[in-house]
Image (cartoon, coloured by chain):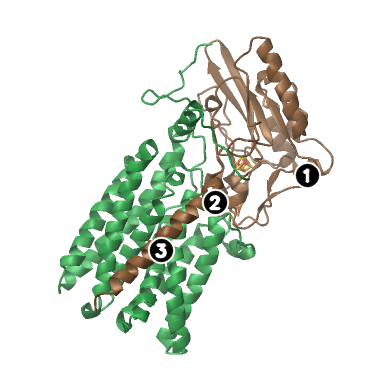
Amino acid sequence: MPRRRDEMVPDAEFRSYYGQPVIKQPIWHEPHMPTYLYLGGLSGAAGAMAAAARLTGRDRLELAARMTAFAGASAGAAFLVAELGRPMRFLNMLRVFKLTSPMSVGSWTLAAHSGLTGVAAGSAVTGLLPLAGDAASVASGLSGVAMATYTAVLLADTAVPAWHEGMRELPFLFSGSALASAGAAVMLTTPRAQAGPARAAAAAGAVAEVVAGGLMERRLGLVGEPYRKGRAGRLMRASRVLTLGGALLATVAGRSRALTALSGLAITAGALCTRFGVLEAGRASAKDPRYTVVPQRDRLDAGRPASVPGR
Amino acid sequence: MAERVGFFTDTSICIGCKACEVACKEWNNVPDDGFVFRATSYDNTGALGASTWRHVAFVEQDGRWLMSSDVCKHCTHAACLDVCPTGALFRTEFDTVVVQSDVCNGCGYCVPACPYGVIDRREDDGRAWKCTLCYDRLRGGMEPACAKACPTKSIQFGPLDELRQRAEERVERLHAEGTTEARLYGANPDNGVGGTGAFFLLLDEPETYGLPPDPVVTTRDLPAMWRWAGGAALALAAGVAACFLGRR
Ligand code: SF4
Ligand code: SF4
């Protein structure tokens, strides 16, 4: 029987059901989900900075990082709950702990991190229980690095090609972006004399974010295309310009308050663009059946069908 | 645990009557999913979704017309179930995959996790819905509504082992009769989802029917994902430490 190729799109050899998607697009909304991803990263890396500041005796910077971590976690949790189809049932998340569900692991991480940053911030504001506040601040460094990276697994653990295939670089993209965001927020809220480490964090995070994103797009080949095309492509490019521009400004701002503010804003906007861009690229890669069908068909044609060893 | 049951959908004898779609909606009280003229073929249902648990695909080709009734695959390794953070999705005593709608909080995680694009969230009640393989009917000792209603026995229900054997024989017969393009889809327990509880006999490549040719349960790679994330977490901690040490 002749192979009919009539349903296919001309530029890539693949067949589909009238061009319809094979998988469902993620239903997470804008701005909720990407803003949550940003705030979670901001809060997580700020927690790590608060711990480092505590351990190296930088009181003023630590206060700024503590408050940033708390504000990010609280606002993030609000966005996350608003995203649910049934917000009143949020607590069902804490009904079970499931290692196979990054959202379950993440909910517990968020609960722990919010609790710790809440104690740390509460103690700083009220002056009560300073030892407990300091201990919570140091502990939020641990919950913080988990907060800043689990969201990459959350996205990768789906059938969405641009996310699943990006499982290696996404955590570095997100943790770099988180460090840049937290560095930006803390350098804006710390007196210049103490803000050195925050500026360094902003610049280092920005570079890590841009490098990880670039590596991911390159390695993914066809499946990396959604990060370059359309709205997602525009967001990812804007993110790169804003992030690198902001990082450069952070290192040359010197005493200028205006330049520091501009740098912080650019880095923040860049981090937000990254999260909106990654969500959009995921959606686009789910919507076009090519990104689902072509890699799977190639696998079959090469005689290497998928299997689930050891289960 | 009862014997594992499932569906064998033999698309070579499907006549596209959509009796399965109707029976499913009637029995399960599934709301309407819109009345859309899609201008593709005799398919105005479109795709599986929160309010479409059976979907008959119509593929018009030169010289023939393929029809196939799609449904949740009730995967051996079900991504939807693995990723559900509330435990709303569970495996029944029949080895099928069902959502408990009173537990689901509408997080939507199962939706992009399914490699077949089956499960979806209803935006009006905020919960995830899909085929239950008529869990209530099974518990009452009855066969699922769609299989019952299918006039050509294209949809066959029964113990999975029995169905797999019957399907092998059917393929052999079709091949002997000259229909060499007949192939089973999902019957192999070594595939990327560990085999499906609902499998198919197809007459063309799966992607022609809107099915993924080689799906894989995303959680297969979860240990690797956590390792990469762990590396990134360590790098973040090291990065922060480097920014704070060395400068005063
Ligand atoms: S087909 Fe999708 S919804 Fe059905 S059991 Fe498999 S993963 Fe879950
Ligand atoms: S939407 Fe409901 S069924 Fe789906 S993963 Fe979330 S809680 Fe589970």
The residue under label 3 is B234
Q: Residue type at mark 3?
A: Leu
Left/right placement of residue A303 relative to residue B18 reads left
| Residue of label 2 | B109
Q: Quadrant of ligand 1?
A: top right
- How would you rate the neighbour count of disc 1 (Cα within 10 Å): few for under 14, some for 14-19, many for 20 or more? few
Chain letter for brown, please: B
The extreme right residue here reads B141
Q: Residue at x 50, y 48 (%)?
A: A27
Q: Chain of mark 3?
A: B
Left or right: B43, with B14 as reference point: left
- Relative side of A301 to A208, left or right: right
Dot 1 or dot 3: first in sequence order is: 1
Numbered disc in front, either 2 or 3: 3
Give the amino acid type for the residue marked by disc 1 in the picture: Asp
> Would you say the beta carbon of the disc 1 residue lies within 8 angstroms of ligand 1?
no
- Quarter of the figure with the C terminus of chain B: bottom left
Residue A95 location, x and y as percent? 64, 64
Question: Which of the two marks, 1 or 3, is nearer to us in this view?
Answer: 3
